[in-house]
Amino acid sequence: GENVEQHPSTLSVQEGDSAVIKCTYSDSASNYFPWYKQELGKRPQLIIDIRSNVGEKKDQRIAVTLNKTAKHFSLHITETQPEDSAVYFCAALPGGYQKVTFGTGTKLQVIP
Amino acid sequence: SAVISQKPSRDICQRGTSLTIQCQVDSQVTMMFWYRQQPGQSLTLIATANQGSEATYESGFVIDKFPISRPNLTFSTLTVSNMSPEDSSIYLCSVGNFNQPQHFGDGTRLSIL
């Protein structure tokens, strides 16, 4: 089955700096890659996703890149703010049947 | 996205008892899933709730311990049976449609004494 590795497990950045979280996956059949943000005590919320026919996607301060050849995808947050502090999970799944495989999570701390 | 209501939001239970968690969606969805999240950990899929048929369980999870119902396209329940302290966790339902992202309920925080 699919295996998703996520790095780093913790990340501290100064407010205004950029943050990058990286994931690798093992199953070449995976073609959909969502990212979830989970604030303390709350549910995971989808913040951005990318499909395999696209190399990059942006939404305001958040961007995701995908390298299908290397089986890598990354989340980039620019101009970080304290409210970006949360745990971020990457995920991978094949199209159609939605059995999602989650990464281990990255705890992001943005220091004011 | 769909509005997902999960009940109860939290509970404290005695060991050996069972608790049923409900997940209600405001629109019909193809897929409903149940996850467990230990404190500080990632999400572990327990099972996929299939409408009109038995749930599909992941390795390490069995129907006797986690019976699941899915009577229609908007509702599912997960029962945690014969609970022990190791079952203390957050249980989350999620929903999705074909080729669409999953969305999560608020979770049930369960503590076993």
Image: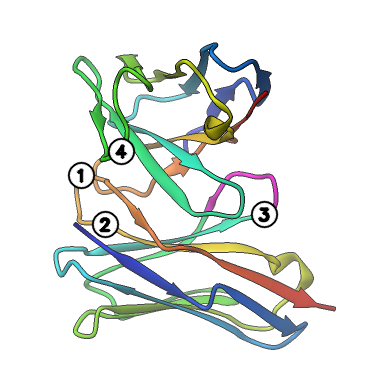
Task: Answer yes or no: are tags 1 and 4 on the same subunit.
Answer: no
Q: Quadrant of residue A87?
A: bottom right
Local SS, label 1: loop
Question: On residue A93, which mark appears?
Answer: 2
Nearer to the camera, A107 or A61? A107
Task: Answer yes or no: are tags 1 and 2 on the same subunit.
Answer: yes
Nearer to the camera, B21 or B3? B21
Q: CA distance from mark 3 to mark 2?
A: 23 Å
Which quadrant of the figure contains the N terminus of chain A? bottom left
What residue lies at 39% left-to-right and 20% top-to-bottom?
B74
Q: Residues within 10 Å of mark 3 (few under 14, many from 20)?
A: some
Residue to which mark 1 is pinned: A97
Residue B96 percent coordinates (x, y): 35, 39
What residue lies at 43% left-to-right and 72% top-to-bottom?
A6
Residue to which mark 4 is pinned: B60
Asked whether B38 falls inside the magenta stretch, the response is: no
The residue type indicated by label 1 comes to Tyr
The residue type indicated by label 4 comes to Gly
Local SS, label 4: loop
Q: Residues within 10 Å of mark 4 (few under 14, many from 20)?
A: few
Residue A111 percent coordinates (x, y): 80, 78
Q: CA distance from mark 3 to mark 1?
A: 27 Å
The span shown in magenta is A40-45
Asked whether A43 falls inside the magenta stretch, the response is: yes
Residue to which mark 3 is pinned: A39
Frontmost of labels 4 and 2 is 4
The residue type indicated by label 3 comes to Glu
Q: Quadrant of residue B12?
A: top right
Q: Residue furthest right?
A: A112
What residue lies at 70% left-to-right and 88% top-to-bottom?
A17
